[in-house]
Image (cartoon, helix red, strand yellow):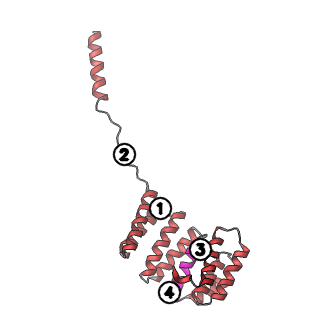
Amino acid sequence: MMKVCKGLFLTFLAVFTVGYTKPNFEVIDSQKNAYLHNNYGLVYVEQGNYYAAVKEFKMAIDLNPNTQATAIFYNNLGNVYYKLEFSKYAVQCFESAKTLYPLNVEYYKNLAKAYKQQGVLNSKIKTYSISKNILDKVLLGFLYLEAGNKQKGIVILDSFCMDEPDLLITGGIKYYINKVKNGTYYDD
């Protein structure tokens, strides 16, 4: 009897343990995939395939909405729309980027360029001149630069830097002030 029980136990053990392997499940990480689609979009931009780039940047935004990284994806998408001269969509993208992460100077610079492409610089200058939001001074400075009024743009941006020396965006603004003074602002 003991031999039969032992034999059944060993058979049972062999059947249930010999072929067992832990299932290999693929972990889906939407944030990682968002970065991947953003990178694909950048490759397509380098190749001049803007429509594929738009698709990739939109996928990146959909996979990872409402984060600081999403602001980068919106900025990249806005740059493509700007190159395609779809200024309405470029403006929407740059505004979204600025809303998600308001301390990146590139978003303000790009938004001002898109407003210029859209032909609404003067109305935006009027709008942002009366704004009480301190970061709107940054956009106002870039709007004046895009309008060709370098002196006024530099004064506004320099004033912002003096008022807000400790903000992360201040170093980037100083960089662009120096580029304007050196005549290399449009070399980007």
Within 10 angstroms of label 2, few (less than 14), some, or many (20 or more) residues? Answer: few
**Mark 1 residue element:** loop
Bounds of the magenta segment: 106-119
Residue 112 falls inside the magenta stretch = yes
Where residue 26 sits: x, y (%)? 37, 48
- The residue singled out by tag 1 in the image is 64
Residues at marks 1 and 4, CA–CA distance in whole angstroms: 29 Å
Residue on which the image places disc 3: 105
Q: Residues within 10 Å of mark 1 (few under 14, many from 20)?
A: some
Residues under labels 1 and 3: Cα distance?
A: 22 Å
Question: In the rendered image, which residue does mark 2 sit on?
Answer: 25
Callout 4, which amino acid? Answer: Gln
What's the amino acid at mark 3? Val
Asked whether, in this view, residue 73 is left or right of residue 185, the answer is: left
Which numbered circle lies on residue 118? 4
**Left or right of 155 in this view: 82:** left
Q: Amino acid at mark 2?
A: Phe
Sequence order check, earlier mark of 1 and 3: 1
Amino acid type of the residue that numbered disc 1 sits on in the rendered structure: Asn
Density class for disc 4 (Cα within 10 Å; few <14, some 14-19, many ≥20) is: some
Nearer the N terminus, badge 4 or badge 2? 2
Secondary structure character of the magenta stretch overall: helix
Looking at the picture, tell me which residue is in the foreground, 55 or 149. Answer: 149
**Do we see residue 66 in this rendering?**
no
C-alpha span from label 2 to label 1: 22 Å
Question: SS of the residue at dot 4?
Answer: helix
